[in-house]
Amino acid sequence: MSQPLQTSASGFGVGLRAKHYDEVIETRPAVDWFEIISENFMVPGGRPLRILDEVRKHYPIAMHGVSLSIGSVDSLNLDYLSQLKELAKRCEPMWISDHLCWTSVGGHNTHDLLPLPYTDETIGHVAERVSRVQDLLGQRILLENVSTYLELEQSKIPEWEFLNAVAERADCEILLDVNNIFVSAYNHGFSARDYLCSIDPKRVRQFHLAGHTDRGAFLHDTHDHPVPEGVWSLYAEALQRFGVVATLIEWDDHIPPLPELIAEAEHARRIATAPHEHTSPDAGRNPGPALEADHGA
Amino acid sequence: MRSRAPLSAVERWDIYANMYFYRLRDCVQQDFAAVAGTIGEVNFHNLMTDYLLAHPPSHFSLRYAGQHLATFLADHELLRDWPYLADLARMEYAIVDAFDAADTQPLDPDALRRVPSEEWPRLQLAVSPAVRLLRLDWPVADVWRAIKDGKEPGVLTAGETHMRVWRRDWCIFHKVIDAHEAAALATLLNGGTFAQMCAAFAEDGQEANIALSMLQTWLAEHVLSASDLSPDALP
């Protein structure tokens, strides 16, 4: 990719969900943008696309996919990419994102975001595929860190080094899911703060914030609760390091009434725009002072 | 996989296994609410276990996870208690298909009126991509309605049933239709002409009246799509 990385922040958004379609169109809520699940709109026609067209008249859209399966050893699904590109032409998104994981193998789609081994070989494999995807789409994509529940023995480096290396080698951008860092840190016993401190700020284009479910032995990334206090705290630390980056409230199940969802986005805005050192205009471009490592996290 | 207290590697893998099953079960249950409501939670859970083993998803969208369910039910043991279950699944998936079928403009009645009478036999009318024509062995619309209304389905009597599922103004409708309309629609869906459509339900010289009545209904219900009706476009 020859275009420079974009560094401007782009506000606070929520997911566009079927439950809220009519209300969004009728009330035009005070939110900066909406994120769609790309696959929900990769359909021949019908109401979803009509809703998308109408929402797009008034709001920017971010496309967030779940089936790119960028880490798979299956060939890239060119039919999928073609439809993804068509959707991008239709809604001219701010950006297109998906997950740093694998989803499909042997032609079967697990519809889950499965962890990769963090090795040099995987870095090369994923980076090559990302480059091809970016060439096909004609733009950089964002890769999101996923919540994980197991680690593979083949992994040689920590997840954050892996994410950085893939983004650097592929020259793509990062969607940093703060909740997923929180969840994975708990599930694998590493420091969420170490994770944050290690990610290259210049490649972070968007945050996700979400709720999860405490199962006792592990945290489950269910996206069906308000953002909990621990994730808000981690978000505040992320803002110190990365600056005010476009932030999405991600809520996919037991979705609340729209005003409650918007209120979560407003809470993120209040945290982000409160008077702190991180609001320096250079915060998004320079790493700034490193956070003190908290090895007890 | 690494074990890390308090969970073993197998327990960690189980988290993914459970997510796989329950995500797909919930998705399919949404699309087949009447099937699920008819057979109950335990039977539906077991059905999904069998179904996903036989038909693990292959499409990138969850929307297609249930695309084989009707076929899978066609010789399933559940038919012993619910012999109409496969037909009910077909009806429900036709509704799913109609929901996101390609958009077209409905055929304007004025466009049809402008076609000279001598051209009508050669006329090829386009059927909306959202239309689904079903030939069923059971009157499952009654079961679908009962479950939707939160009632127990009554006892069904087997009998050939034709059903049209379609979309108008972003809403999905279904209707039991007679054999004449089913034959007429089938002809059009196969690319037949108006003359062939009338021949499909020849009825003692009443074909024209029946056809006109059908057309009026189809136009009002947006069953037909706008297409080139000029003489040059006709076969």
Image (cartoon, coloured by chain):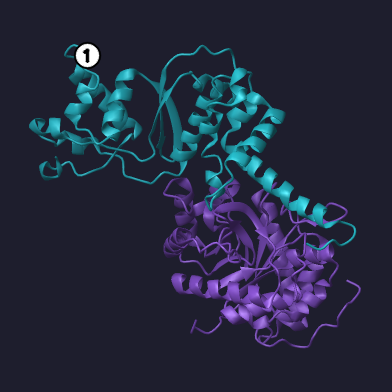
Chain colours: A purple, B cyan
Vertical comparison of A173 with A43: above or below: below
Q: Quadrant of residue A69?
A: bottom right
Chain identifier of the residue bearing label 1 in the image: B
Nearer to the camera, A97 or A148: A148
* Point 65% across, 40% down: residue: B25
- Along the line of sight, which residue is nearer the eye, A250 or A198? A198
* Farthest residue, direction left: B118
Quarter the C terminus of chain B occupies: top left
B23 on left or right of A213: left
Q: Secondary structure at mark 1?
A: loop
Q: Note whether B9 is above or below B50 in the view shown.
A: below
Residue indicated by mark 1? B203
Q: Residue at x 38, y 35 (%)?
A: B131
Provide residue B129's location: percent of width, then percent of height.
Answer: 36, 41
Q: Give, as a three-letter code, the residue at label 1.
A: Glu
Other-residue count near label 1 (Cα within 10 Å), few / some / many at <14 / 14–19 / ≥20: few
Looking at the image, is A40 positioned above or below residue A146? above
